[in-house]
Image: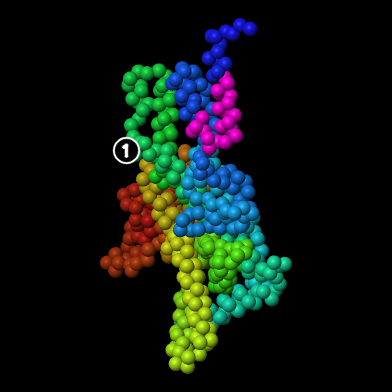
């Protein structure tokens, strides 16, 4: 057999390429090892190796984001969220260890699959939340629940002056116990227990979205860490063109500029996914057809009582031999409550209950009573009674501590959803931002459109003897093309007897415009209304504010 030594390097190269590719496919976290071997073959033996182009992973890859995304309903029910450390811990496992997921794992997955997976994950989360909110609405619409909540709301309004505007702890405890009378599941859970789990799953989904955003920022920051100055990044495409290099090099430089631009923007800001998920659900939650959801803030106190009892039970199991159901964190509940309160715009309503102040007052009063009893019994030297008192004091301390931890978690979660702003304040802020954008954009109005607007205004004013009862309004239509203007008829409201119809049949405007509400002021005695000269087109062109009778108004040209 005669060997052709000229084909020997090609045979070795093909064999190594095939081996490295297959082994990397089996264990993606070993990509770095095979990459070094590939480089070694190139440097030592001069072989032209083929790049595998496989997604890379690390030894600390953790659970893949794709798997979580496809099974998010399983993930939120089997994992517990920790708000402070941004980590998910598995509830229970058949192994001797529990799986955890943190920001580094998410960042590694994003580096493997690309940043495009982030938006897809949020879309999957949105679909999941839609299903969970349907169940949430059904629970709140149930007659047993709705009637109890309406009764509690009426009760609090009647006694809030006597109770120093604090919701009674006993009332919440009574609600929690009363729900158990409606029935229990085979494993002993009440309807309120299941509702708490539903809210925790919603909060876990929001915690997962937060971790995705943090992981994306972490991934982009790691990728761009070798750029010396993010504020001053040179344009490589221009430099390559100045040097007169090949078109292929210019295209490569253009791609590099695009990658650096994306990484810079992503590492600096990220996407406000929470804001998006609030904006998409809030209008439906606050609509008139979902008025039964407006009672939610009143069910939060009994929910917190239920959660604290459950949390203490789970923590006590950590010290037992049978650790089934043991847990040390479940901040998904706080995230879920904060998110739903934001969707319903009920932060002020919940704060008006002064619930956590009432809890502190209740437990501190009981602790003070136990301390006094201990002082009295210490003189009697009754050891059994003293032991009972010590256990009671310890139990009260644990409950008070759990309520404090829940209060801190809920306060932290509210920050993510801008708890300092009500829905009205957010709407006002959006209008101001839109106004600033409108004034910053340069636009011009043609002379023909201006004359049409002036003639329409003057014609309308002839029909309006007193602007106090007249209003001009421009209906906001859907945005068309950039060259297409909003068109709106002039509208007159509160027509008097014998006056024209409420909607004057005037030509539609060719220019976007707005008219502020009339500003009432006392008429000037030195210049009475009847002596004022009629408005003309020259007056309209020269000024943007006019006086008519005892009213003034302002036209703002866009």
Q: Position of residue 438 (x, y in %)?
A: 40, 47
Which residue is at 40% across, 23% downward?
A: 250
Q: Quadrant of residue 517?
A: bottom left
Q: Between 459 and 52, which is closer to the camera in this rendering?
A: 52
Residue bearing the label numbered 1: 229
Establish if 507 lies above or below 415: above
Q: Name the residue rendered at 61%, 75% in the picture.
A: 176
Task: Answer whether residue 330 is visible to the viewer in this image.
Answer: yes
Q: Which residues are magenta?
A: 14-34
One can see residue 299 in this view: no
Left or right? Give the position of 443 relative to 486: left
- Of the pair 129 and 520, the residue shown nearer to us: 129
Q: Is residue 521 above or below residue 225?
A: below
| Residue 70 spot, x, y in % from top left | 62, 46
Q: How is the image coloured?
A: rainbow
Q: Is 225 left, or right, of 89 in this rendering? A: left
- Residue 77: x, y in percent? 61, 57
Residue 15 colored in magenta in the image: yes
Viewer-side residue, 199 vs 368: 368
For residue 305, what is the image quadrant? bottom right
């Amino acid at each position: 057999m005669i060997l052709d030594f000229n084909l020997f390097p090609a045979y070795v190269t093909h064999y190594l390429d095939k081996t490295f590719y297959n082994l990397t496919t089996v264990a993606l976290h070993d990509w770095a090892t095979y990459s070094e071997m590939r480089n070694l073959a190139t440097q030592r033996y001069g072989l032209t190796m083929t790049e595998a182009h496989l997604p890379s992973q690390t030894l600390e890859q953790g659970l893949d984001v794709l798997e979580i995304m496809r099974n998010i309903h399983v993930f939120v029910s089997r994992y517990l969220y920790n708000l402070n450390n941004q980590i998910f811990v598995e509830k229970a496992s058949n192994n001797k260890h529990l799986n955890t997921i943190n920001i580094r794992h998410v960042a590694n997955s994003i580096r493997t699959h690309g940043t495009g997976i982030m938006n897809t994950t949020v879309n999957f989360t949105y679909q999941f939340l839609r299903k969970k909110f349907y169940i949430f609405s059904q629970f709140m619409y149930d007659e047993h629940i709705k009637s109890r909540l309406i009764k509690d709301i009426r009760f609090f309004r009647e006694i809030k002056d006597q109770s120093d505007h604090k919701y009674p702890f006993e009332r919440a405890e009574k609600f929690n116990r009363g729900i158990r009378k409606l029935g229990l599941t085979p494993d002993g859970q009440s309807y309120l227990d299941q509702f708490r789990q539903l809210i925790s799953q919603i909060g876990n989904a929001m915690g997962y979205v937060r971790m995705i955003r943090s992981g994306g920022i972490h991934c982009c920051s790691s990728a761009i860490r070798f750029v010396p100055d993010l504020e001053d990044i040179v344009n490589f495409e221009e430099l390559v063109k100045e040097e007169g290099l090949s078109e292929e090099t210019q295209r490569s430089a253009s791609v590099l500029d695009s990658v650096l631009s994306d990484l810079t923007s992503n590492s600096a800001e990220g996407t406000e996914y929470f804001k998006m998920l609030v904006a998409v659900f809030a209008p439906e939650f606050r609509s008139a057809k979902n008025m039964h959801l407006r009672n939610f803030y009143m069910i939060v106190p009994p929910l917190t009582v239920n959660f604290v009892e459950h949390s203490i039970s789970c923590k006590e199991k950590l010290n037992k031999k049978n650790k089934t159901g043991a847990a040390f964190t479940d901040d998904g509940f706080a995230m879920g409550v904060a998110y739903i309160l934001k969707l319903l715009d009920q932060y002020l309503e919940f704060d008006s209950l002064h619930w956590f102040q009432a809890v502190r007052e209740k437990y501190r009063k009981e602790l003070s009573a136990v301390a006094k009893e201990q002082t009295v019994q210490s003189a009697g030297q009754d050891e059994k009674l003293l032991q009972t008192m010590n256990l009671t004091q310890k139990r009260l301390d644990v409950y008070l501590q759990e309520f404090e931890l829940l209060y801190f978690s809920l306060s932290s979660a509210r920050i993510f959803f801008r708890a300092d702003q009500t829905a009205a304040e957010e709407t006002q802020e959006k209008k101001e931002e839109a106004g600033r954008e409108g004034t910053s954009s340069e636009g011009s109005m043609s002379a023909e459109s201006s004359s049409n607007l002036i003639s329409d205004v003057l014609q309308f004013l002839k029909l309006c003897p007193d602007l106090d009862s007249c209003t001009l309004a421009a209906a906001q239509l859907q945005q068309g093309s950039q060259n297409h203007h909003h068109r709106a008829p002039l509208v007159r409201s509160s027509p008097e007897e014998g006056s024209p119809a409420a909607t004057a049949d005037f030509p539609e405007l060719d220019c976007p415009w707005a008219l502020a509400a009339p500003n009432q002021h006392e008429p000037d005695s030195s210049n009475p209304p009847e002596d004022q000269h009629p408005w003309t087109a020259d007056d309209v062109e020269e000024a943007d504010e006019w006086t008519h009778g005892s009213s003034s108004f302002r036209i703002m040209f866009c």
